Amino acid sequence: MSRYSVQVAIIGGGATGVGILRDLSLRGISALLIEQGDLAHGTSSRFHGLLHSGARYAVKDPVSALECAQENAILKRIAPNCIVSSGGWFVQRPEDDPGYVEAWLQGCRAAHIPVLEVPVSQARRQEPLLAKDILRVFEVPDAAVDGFKLVWDNARSARCHGGRYLTYHRVDEVRRDGNQVVGVRGKNLLTGEDFAVESSLVVNAAGAWADRIAASAGVSLEVVCDKGTLLAFNHRLFQRVINRLRSSGDGDIFVPHETITIFGTTSQRVEDPLDNQPTELEVKQLLSLGSALLPGLTEQRVIRVFAGVRPLHGEDSELNEPSGQAAGREVSRTFALIDHEAVEGIRGFLSVVGGKFTTYRLMAEKASDWAAAKLGSTSPCRTAQEPLLPDVPESLYREAQALLPCAAAEKMLERLGEEALPVLEAVRQDPGKGQLLCECEMVTVAEVEKAVADEDAHHLADVRRKTRLGMGTCQGAFCAYRALPLMWREGNKYDPLGVELIRFLNQRWKGIRPALWGEQLRETEFTRAIYAGLLALKESDGDSGGTA
């Protein structure tokens, strides 16, 4: 059995958990994060990638609106490489309630969200795909954020300050000595070995699994799983975030991400965090709803459909409605910190639930404040001031651009920062490693080689989350098999490569299947010809899970 000893054990490797790890590490508090999969494999990678200005919540949820507005500004300052400040528009259609507009403007003023009305004629010139009958357009400081980058940058920063994390380690029990929490125990899912962590405090940031973690400690926690389905289109439909100016509903946000667009989302109560399979019916419903803002949306190519499960705090009575359908929209998107000593007399145990990706840093700050107070530490929070990663030296930019295609150099430096040095050294020694292994996402052989060799990469999907390999238009058709020789060089680190490849393709298939028509169907048949024909892979019942 592996044993660890730290001051704080953190359960959950999404944005909030990794944010807590960084915050505590910056304060000099020893912490260990335990995650049952890879970092960012859950809800933190299964959302539309919107960095909220707060305007979406200005009417019904003023607390969340203010939190998002403040954190929006902080994250743009500390994590600029993860964020594209595209700006956002809220667009009113003729059928939208005109009374809502005035209430929305008042709510934005109360939350100190800057709003600028854009003349409709100007809006049509700047976004020609917008519906021609829109009535009013307002600009707010929305932005697009890369969840993978942000989580991994937090992890790297935490590691630089002494923080540690264990991936593919499942927590089975929060251990107690009487009413005092003393650590956790569980299983290493890679080796089957048991592990135990001794700690003074345990922070439960397990998202949709938080109620199960709480139950293992003998306490109750109400978490409701709210599934949201999203569509990824094969090109950039808009240059900025487009929101429907109405009370929040299904299918009212378009978020541009580099060369693609993500559109959604839905809200449906599910019983299990793993119930994240999107359906063809949801795709058709979203396309119909989105056509009100972008006529002809049904003719655009959907390359992927994915769903995330929001962990909502279940104290709201509306969440107990049998259908669970629209109820999720009515729940506040602010977060809750539950000190189980105050509620049930269990000392040293905190649960963090609810919130938004945009407010992950604030959630981490409040949880870390709690831990610091319990441990008698007076070190203040520094995460609102200190950048996640140091600025990349100009000399490194010049060197990367001299060795690699310009776009590939920029994307790699955004992902790796100064950790790009070994990649560039590999290209200097062997220029062939500067070739693009994944053309869609501009990922070089050298970068994939580094990711494959990383100690915390255990599957091809882990390499994908680090590099975006296979996340572009072809969804892995032309790049997945190219990574296999690099994995083979790592000896027995990975599962048999046929198993890894089938698992990876099944993960991609999960998101392609609900949109299997038109050009996407043709490409899928071509992909099948490559893998089933040329490479002689057979259909498998392998793992079809994974993230978007």
Image: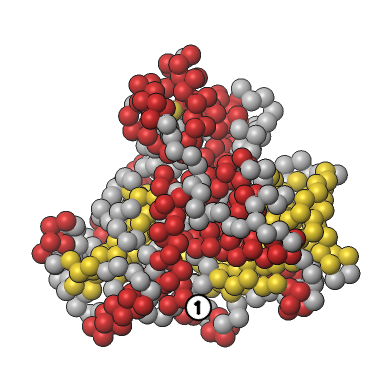
Q: Find residue 37 and report its horizontal and vertical position in percent.
A: 64, 49
Q: Is residue 86 left or right of residue 2?
A: left
**The residue positioned farthest toward the front in the image shown:** 378
Residue 439, quarter of picture: top left
In the rendered structure, which amino acid carries the disc numbered 1?
Answer: Val
Could you tell me which residue is drawn at 42 percent across and 22 percent down? 434
Q: Find residue 522 and report its horizontal and vertical position in percent.
A: 34, 43
Residue 436, placed above or below residue 324: above
Q: Is residue 125 visible?
A: yes
Q: Neighbour class for label 1 at 10 Å: few (<14), some, many (≥20)? A: some
Could you tell me which residue is drawn at 70 percent across and 72 percent down? 339
Residue 461, placed above or below residue 331: above
Return the residue at label 1: 331
Q: Nearer the viewer, residue 354 or 281?
A: 354
Q: Is residue 519 left or right of residue 477?
A: left
**The residue positioned farthest toward the top in the image shown:** 429
**The residue positioned farthest toward the left in the image shown:** 121
